[in-house]
Image (cartoon, helix red, strand yellow):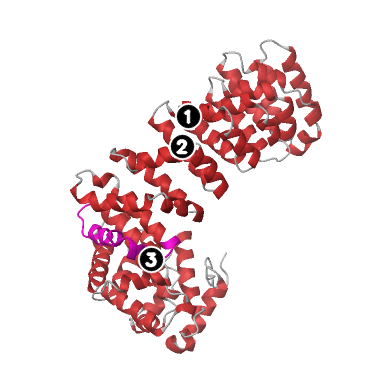
């Protein structure tokens, strides 16, 4: 089969209009195992196929791309980098996006290979073409180019190639294409900056990080909304947070939140700014962030009372993030009756809001109420019980009612709430004393889809693995949970059949 493919490949190279042969070759190579193609890699002559891409013939181009995609998988990245340089450069400037994507996929293979990547680093023209691909209309082409440049920048040589040569000027020129392309370059810069302090230093020296931060704190509200997402990505790293703090950016973001009340367009950027602080609090210290930037906590509470579902959703998500660790829970607890009222609103929204907001509320509740076994002090258990009871007059029935609704996502989110409290003795007593709850937990007929079965299994597992469950639920129920657990999430009870004498 591989020999047949090689013969057809030679035939294609010999003909001027080889459509029939290309169709035949495409059919044959799809059937040839890659291992066989790799054995014949030395004999694969791909130049003629690349040459055929230069002719303005749509079907011919499509066939060649399909064939090359397959054949190039059999060729080592080093061979591609060394022997197909000219073809790669032509591919990156080809008018057909499928050819650019094919070429960038090969660039992607090359930059992942430590032996091959130097070939690209030494090819300034090819690097320049990759940079200009960021400015193309096709998003897939731009994303592939960003990914390749980001990968190249993981090495010292790559950083120098990108930031200490004419390529930096090319990057800045590409940024001038339009707003969308400028944000793509920012995305690349943030990706590179996130790798290490050294990478960040190269990016700041280039002036592009400063430009991004200037736009973040500028007057254009739509630009702010886009830039804050990228700055939040930078803040996921310790060195990124340090840099933002040193440059006064975090203080500036806080000041913009303070001034948001008098800005009629603040709804465009406020959600992103609040999310930024929510993530910052969890990654650093919730207590320190909330004490240093009280406007953040104030704004979150204020947003939960908004009439705008977008604002409520962001506030709910942020409360969930903030309350995901013990320090954050204690910060919220210190707000006293104000947080109790927030919990009541959370319970109300979980019952009455749109499906999407209900799920976000349920996820936040799960995050707030979960306590790892090693952190279950008497005070924290009392706090969790108090929070649970603040959500509704009968919180257990509220979530049980939601879990019975015929929407898998809601069902799973409600089960997740039960799972969050399943290892806490007060919650186990509530469950045991709720009529029919234990039967509901071990009833497999309730769940019909995989996600729901998985969610129910996690609840059973959390209960069965708790040290207090046998005492609270009683041994018979504990054994039912252990049986469910050992049978797995997808167990189906065999249906007994009775044979009748004389029946067919």
Residue 261 percent coordinates (x, y): 20, 51
Q: Does the magenta stretch include residue 302?
A: yes
In the rendered image, the vertical position of residue 406 relative to residue 212, given as above or below: below
Task: Estimate the x, y position of residue 75 in percent, counting from the top left.
Answer: 74, 33
Crowdedness near tag 1: few (<14), some (14–19) or many (≥20) residues, C-alpha within 10 Å = some
Q: Is label 1 in a helix, a strand or a loop?
A: helix
In the drawing, what numbered circle is on residue 477?
A: none
- Distance between the alpha carbons at the discs numbered 3 and 1: 38 Å
Judge whether 179 appears above or below 405 on screen: above
In magenta segment, residue 223: no
The front one of 290 and 326 is 290
Q: How crowded is mark 2: few (under 14 residues within 10 Å), some or many (20 or more)?
A: some
Q: Quadrant of residue 33?
A: top right
Report the magenta stretch's main SS: helix
Q: What stretch is highlighted in magenta?
A: 282-308
Residue 88 place in picture, x, y as percent = 64, 25
Residue annotated with mark 1: 172
Judging by the rendered image, the residue that carries numbered circle 3 is 288
| Front-lying residue, 419 or 447 | 419
Q: Report the residue at 35% width, 61% height from top.
A: 410
**Tag 2 and tag 1, C-beta contact below 8 Å:** yes
Q: Can residue 262 be seen in this view?
A: yes
Dividing the image into 4 quarters, which one contains the N terminus?
top right
Give the CA distance from mark 2 to mark 3. 30 Å
Rendering quarter of residue 96: top right
Q: Find residue 208 and name its label.
A: 2
- Image position of 18 with respect to 461: above or below: above
First in sequence: mark 2 vs mark 1: 1
The answer to which quarter of the image holds residue 428 is bottom left
């Amino acid at each position: 089969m591989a020999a047949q493919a090689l013969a057809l490949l030679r035939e294609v190279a010999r003909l001027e209009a080889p459509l029939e042969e290309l169709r035949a070759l495409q059919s044959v190579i799809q059937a040839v195992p890659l291992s066989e193609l790799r054995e014949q890699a030395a004999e694969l002559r791909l130049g003629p196929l690349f040459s055929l891409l230069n002719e303005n013939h749509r079907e011919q181009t499509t066939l060649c791309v399909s064939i090359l995609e397959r054949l190039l998988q059999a060729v080592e990245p080093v061979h591609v980098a060394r022997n197909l340089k000219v073809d790669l450069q032509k591919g990156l400037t080809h008018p057909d996006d499928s050819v650019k994507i094919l070429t960038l996929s090969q660039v992607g293979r090359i930059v992942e290979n430590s032996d091959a990547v130097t070939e690209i680093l030494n090819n300034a023209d090819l690097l320049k073409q990759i940079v200009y691909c960021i400015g193309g209309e096709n998003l897939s082409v731009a994303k592939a180019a960003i990914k390749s440049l980001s990968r190249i920048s993981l090495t010292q040589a790559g950083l120098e190639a990108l930031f200490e040569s004419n390529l930096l000027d090319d990057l800045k020129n590409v940024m001038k294409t339009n707003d969308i392309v400028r944000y793509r370059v920012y995305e690349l810069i943030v990706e590179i900056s996130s790798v290490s302090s050294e990478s960040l230093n190269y990016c700041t020296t280039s002036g592009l990080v400063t430009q991004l931060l200037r736009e973040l704190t500028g007057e254009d509200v739509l630009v702010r909304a886009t830039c804050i997402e990228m700055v939040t990505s930078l803040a996921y790293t310790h060195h990124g947070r340090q840099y933002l703090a040193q440059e006064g950016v975090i203080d500036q973001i806080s000041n913009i939140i303070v001034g948001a009340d008098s800005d009629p367009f603040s709804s465009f950027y406020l959600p992103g700014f609040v999310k930024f602080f929510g993530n910052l609090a969890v990654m650093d210290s919730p207590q320190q962030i909330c004490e240093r930037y009280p406007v953040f906590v104030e704004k979150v509470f204020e947003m939960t009372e908004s009439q705008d579902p977008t604002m409520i959703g962001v506030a709910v998500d942020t409360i969930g993030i903030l309350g995901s660790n013990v320090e954050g829970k204690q910060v919220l607890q210190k707000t006293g009756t104000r947080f109790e009222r927030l919990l009541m609103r959370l319970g109300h929204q979980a019952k009455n809001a749109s499906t999407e907001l209900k799920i976000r509320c349920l996820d936040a509740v799960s995050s707030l109420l979960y306590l790892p076994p090693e952190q279950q002090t008497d005070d924290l258990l009392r706090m969790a019980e108090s929070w649970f009871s603040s959500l509704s007059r009968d919180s257990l029935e509220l979530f049980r009612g939601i879990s019975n609704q015929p929407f898998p996502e809601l069902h799973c989110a409600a089960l997740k709430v039960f799972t969050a409290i399943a290892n806490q003795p007060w919650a186990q007593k509530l469950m045991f004393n709720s009529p029919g709850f234990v039967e509901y937990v071990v009833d497999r007929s309730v769940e019909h889809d995989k996600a729901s079965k998985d969610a129910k299994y996690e609840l059973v597992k959390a209960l069965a693995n708790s040290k207090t469950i046998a005492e609270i639920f009683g041994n018979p129920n504990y054994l039912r949970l252990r049986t469910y657990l050992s049978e797995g999430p997808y167990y189906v009870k065999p249906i007994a059949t009775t044979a009748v004498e004389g029946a067919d």
